[in-house]
Image (tube, coloured by chain):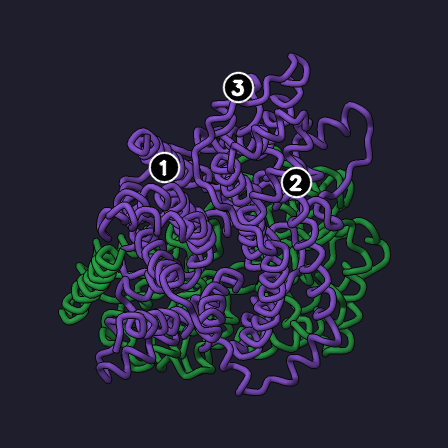
């Protein structure tokens, strides 16, 4: 028995040591022509961009996808030893938080300043938005007329009782939306709106935007809120869908937007290459790939969206600097929990 | 120092290695976060706790009933299709729970094809299966029953058949044998299986998220994400650990003094059933296989076929081999660890702190994977910094961190089956072998190994499959270039691209099948040699 045990111990420790040694030598080589990215944007939505960048510049992109919170936590713990040069996320909340934790350095890039509108980047350019995700109303054209579709506050009106579907409050997109309501209307009014939403719900909040649309299609409810690219996907699969997008708050504050964006890490080892990559992502060719990959809106206002996206018409964007939404996200969560919005 | 002391010191070392990440998480109590607690106690906390307890109760009852009855039918009764159904019952285990979650929801929820059909046909109002607790309890039962089934089946096969034979001769009915003999004898195995299923339930994040059913685990994640407080999340995690400890006590208590003392393979004649009875059982077992396996897999196959053109990529070969290598490596390490701990436990008397330490080291399975993963990451980064200041990053970006995470998380999975295998070796067997002149190596090769092997193989299989499905730790700690199938499944399904996620899900299932086949081969070969 003991022999077996000892053999196992030796074997397992050899395995561990062997593997870690490999890694050690890997890390020791510093390659001049690369950039290391931590990305909370899923692989299939980011790799084509990196491939194209490598094609054009010869700079290799070594990227690791992950959950945004976990990646930020990892960066915090790794500190100055981090192998990463930049962070990409899918929402502004995590960009703001990473900046707040001192993980980014100012990019001081005139190119980015020119390409990306001011409300989509951090005032000190600690991060910048790269693609725009609009969160707006979706409705069934047979059961709701276009004039009835007004905006976020209106969804709290009793006329929508039993007709509203919402995605779970756990979604960062909903938290950012609520944060924008707080910014425009204050906490008290936002709390009332949330209570109205919860009161109007036709079903327990769905776990995905796509489920919200399926519920509307099936007649469980008539109206809901989605990020537009989910609608785009549905429309591409079924061009005759009876669902329609309605632009929210056009006569008031504009439609709420969020961004997928990036920041240059303070402890980047390849900061020139990382900056080059972020700048490249803000330019026209990359911006068009963003649109083509996931039907998002370009952040660069000189680039036209993909034709399907363009067919939904133009809309007025909420012009609040996105940094505010990051700052208000915690307050938003508190109000959401108080309203018992699941 | 004698060898016993040395072994105990070695054991302490291993236990501390496995427990450190848990301790790192518990240490969060030194940092206050009272505001968040106040807010939680005013809003979500109580519903989170009661939801969690209800889910545990429902799933506990569900997996026990389903797992034990299925195991008994396949081991003790002869019915049409038994051979194939017996193996198919294992399979749902190889699909991540949340994948089955979204398949079921897609099929059976209000907008799904089943309800749409019923509505059109009968003008039925429809219902939201996400409402209430029954829907999620059923789904999780269907996903998690294989834990109980696997262990109970093993126990039924290796039960003392002279007892069963005598009971039969004395005219005891089939149900009587089941209830008065088989179940009590298999109690430790059943309890271990239920325990695993419940710990998995406690730690589940994906399935409850799809049903929007808020549990402690989803609460922990939201505290971390929304309040940016890893401290509060870790503190909340200790509540989970508390529940897990309670469950362990209940398990110990329910085991009582039961312990099985024979490991003969079944040579019993199975019950010959009358035609309609036999078909009734086929119907029951078949419908479980249909619901838990055939139906979801058919849906996945359909999706995979329509998306294969956009989804297939040669990188899948890498992901498959990564998943496989990680699974096998982690299984060997974890089972090896469980064997070491148990052989020391078997050979020497353990002090109570050591026993408690072993129990504690088993708790990693009940923690939400995301919290555990962060705990391990923080720990490894600390250690790396300590070992080589400024250069320590290689430790956390190597594969070591990930393998440690798997061991911490899945020790409990390996521990149960390994422990009951060890328990089946009685001191009298060792003494008998010794008195017949067997030396240690002969004892190991002719007594221990044959008796342990089925249990070890099952344990290794369960760990390997669990590792393949594991997400949060793999996602956070994998070295560069170690993407896996589970990561692909997650990234696609988190974007709502369920159809495309079908292909990697089926590949996971394929790997699981391969593992099952290997288990079958190894245990069969063993059986022949043991004769």
Outermost residue toward the right? A158
Q: Is residue A99 above or below residue A115?
A: below
Mark yes or no: residue A231 visible: no
Quarter of the image where the N terminus of chain B is located:
bottom left
> Residue A177: horizontal and vertical position, in percent?
63, 66
Q: For the point 23% across and 76% down, which residue is it?
A: A269
Residue B116 in percent (x, y) is at: 71, 31
Q: Is residue B431 visible?
A: yes
Label count reads 3
Could you tell which of marks 2 and 3 lies nearer the N-terminus?
2
- Mark 3, residue position: B81
Please tell me if label 1 and label 3 are on a single chain: yes
The circle drawn on residue A150 is none
Q: CA distance from mark 1 to mark 2?
A: 25 Å
Q: Residues within 10 Å of mark 3 (few under 14, many from 20)?
A: some
The hue in which chain B appears in the rendered picture of the protein: purple
Quadrant into which the C terminus of chain B falls: top left
Q: Position of residue A337 (x, y in %)?
A: 71, 70
Q: Nearer the viewer, residue A87 or B300?
A: B300
Do the residues under discs 2 and 3 have CB atoms within 8 angstroms? no
Residue at disc 3, secondary structure: loop
Q: CA distance from mark 1 to mark 3?
A: 21 Å
The chain identifier of the residue carrying mark 2 reads: B
- How far apart marks 2 and 3 lie (CA) works out to 21 Å
Residue bearing mark 1: B519
Q: Picture coordinates of residue B183 (x, y %)?
A: 61, 41
**Chain A drawing hue:** green
Q: Which residue is mark 2?
A: B65
Does label 1 or label 3 sit earlier along the sequence? 3
Looking at the picture, do discs 2 and 3 lie on one chain?
Answer: yes
């Amino acid at each position: 028995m003991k022999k077996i045990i000892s053999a196992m111990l030796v074997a397992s420790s050899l395995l561990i040591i062997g593997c870690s040694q490999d890694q050690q030598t890997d890390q020791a080589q510093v390659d001049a022509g690369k950039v290391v990215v931590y990305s909370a944007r899923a692989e299939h939505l980011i790799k084509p961009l990196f491939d194209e960048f490598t094609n054009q510049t010869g700079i290799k992109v070594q990227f690791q996808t992950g959950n945004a919170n976990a990646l930020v936590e990892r960066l915090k713990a790794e500190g100055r030893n981090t192998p990463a040069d930049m962070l990409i996320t899918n929402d502004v909340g995590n960009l703001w938080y990473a900046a707040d934790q001192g993980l980014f350095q100012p990019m001081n890039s005139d190119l980015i300043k020119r390409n990306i509108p001011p409300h989509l980047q951090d005032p000190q350019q600690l991060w910048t938005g790269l693609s725009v995700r609009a969160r707006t109303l979706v409705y069934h054209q047979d059961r709701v007329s276009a004039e009835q579709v007004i905006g976020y506050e209106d969804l709290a009106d009793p006329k929508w009782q039993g007709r509203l579907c919402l995605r779970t409050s756990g979604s960062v997109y909903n938290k950012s939306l609520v944060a924008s309501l707080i910014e425009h209307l204050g906490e008290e009014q936002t709390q009332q709106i949330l209570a109205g939403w919860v009161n109007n719900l036709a079903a327990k909040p769905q776990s995905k935007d796509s489920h919200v649309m399926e519920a509307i299609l099936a007649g469980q409810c008539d109206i809901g809120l989605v990020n537009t690219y989910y609608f785009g996907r549905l429309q591409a699969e079924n061009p005759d869908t009876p669902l329609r997008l309605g632009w929210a708050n056009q006569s008031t504050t504009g439609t709420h937007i969020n961004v997928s964006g990036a920041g240059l890490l303070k402890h980047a080892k390849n900061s020139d290459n990382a900056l080059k990559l972020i700048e490249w992502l803000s330019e026209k060719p990359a911006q068009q790939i963003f649109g083509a990959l996931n039907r998002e809106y370009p952040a660069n206002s000189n680039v036209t969206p993909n034709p399907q996206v363009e067919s939904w018409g133009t809309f007025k964007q909420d012009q609040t600097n996105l940094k505010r939404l990051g700052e208000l996200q915690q307050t938003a969560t508190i109000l959401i929990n108080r309203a018992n919005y699941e | 120092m004698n060898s016993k002391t040395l072994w105990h010191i070695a054991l302490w070392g291993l236990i501390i290695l496995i427990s450190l990440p848990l301790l790192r998480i518990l240490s969060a109590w030194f940092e206050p976060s009272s505001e968040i607690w106040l807010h939680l106690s005013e809003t979500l906390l109580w519903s989170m706790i009661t939801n969690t307890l209800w889910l545990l109760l429902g799933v506990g009852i569900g997996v026990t009933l389903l797992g034990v009855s299925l195991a008994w039918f396949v081991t003790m009764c002869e019915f049409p299709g038994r051979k194939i159904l017996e193996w198919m019952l294992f399979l749902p285990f190889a699909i991540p729970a949340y994948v089955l979650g979204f398949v079921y929801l897609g099929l059976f929820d209000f907008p799904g094809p089943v309800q749409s059909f019923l509505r059109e046909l009968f003008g039925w109002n429809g219902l939201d299966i996400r409402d209430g607790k029954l829907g999620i309890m059923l789904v999780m039962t269907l996903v998690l029953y294989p834990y109980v089934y696997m262990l109970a089946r093993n126990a039924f096969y290796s039960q003392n058949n002279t007892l069963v034979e005598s009971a039969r001769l004395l005219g005891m009915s089939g149900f009587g044998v089941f209830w008065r003999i088989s179940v009590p004898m298999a109690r430790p195995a059943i309890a271990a299986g239920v325990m695993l299923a419940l710990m998995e339930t406690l730690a589940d994040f994906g399935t409850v998220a799809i049903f929007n059913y808020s549990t402690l685990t989803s609460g922990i994640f939201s505290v971390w994400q929304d309040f940016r407080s890893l401290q509060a999340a870790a503190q909340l995690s200790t509540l989970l650990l508390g529940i897990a400890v309670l469950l362990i006590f209940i398990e110990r208590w329910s085991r009582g003094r039961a312990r099985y003392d024979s490991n003969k393979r079944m040579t019993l004649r199975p019950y010959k059933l009358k035609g309609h009875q036999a078909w009734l059982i086929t119907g029951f077992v078949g419908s479980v296989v249909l619901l838990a396996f055939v139906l979801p897999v058919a849906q996945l196959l359909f999706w995979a076929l329509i998306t294969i053109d956009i989804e297939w990529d040669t990188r899948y070969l890498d992901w498959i081999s990564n998943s496989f290598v990680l699974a096998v490596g982690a299984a060997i390490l974890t089972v090896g660890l469980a064997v070491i701990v148990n052989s020391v436990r078997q050979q020497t008397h353990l002090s109570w702190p050591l026993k408690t330490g072993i129990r504690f080291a088993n708790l990693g399975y009940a923690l939400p994977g995301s919290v555990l993963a962060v705990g391990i990451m923080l720990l490894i980064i600390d250690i790396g910094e300590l070992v080589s200041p400024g250069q320590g990053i290689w430790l956390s970006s190597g594969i070591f961190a990930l393998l440690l995470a798997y061991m911490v998380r899945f020790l409990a999975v390996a521990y149960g089956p390994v422990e009951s295998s060890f328990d089946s070796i009685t001191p009298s067997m060792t003494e008998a072998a010794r008195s017949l002149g067997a030396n240690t190596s002969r004892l190991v090769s002719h007594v221990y190994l044959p008796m342990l092997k089925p249990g070890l193989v099952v344990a290794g299989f369960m760990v390997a499959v669990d590792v393949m499905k594991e997400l949060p730790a793999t996602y956070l700690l994998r070295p560069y270039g170690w993407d896996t199938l589970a990561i692909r499944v997650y990234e696609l399904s988190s974007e709502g691209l369920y159809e495309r996620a079908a292909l990697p899900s089926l590949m996971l299932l394929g790997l699981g099948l391969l593992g099952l086949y290997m288990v079958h081969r190894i245990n069969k070969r063993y059986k022949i040699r043991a004769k």
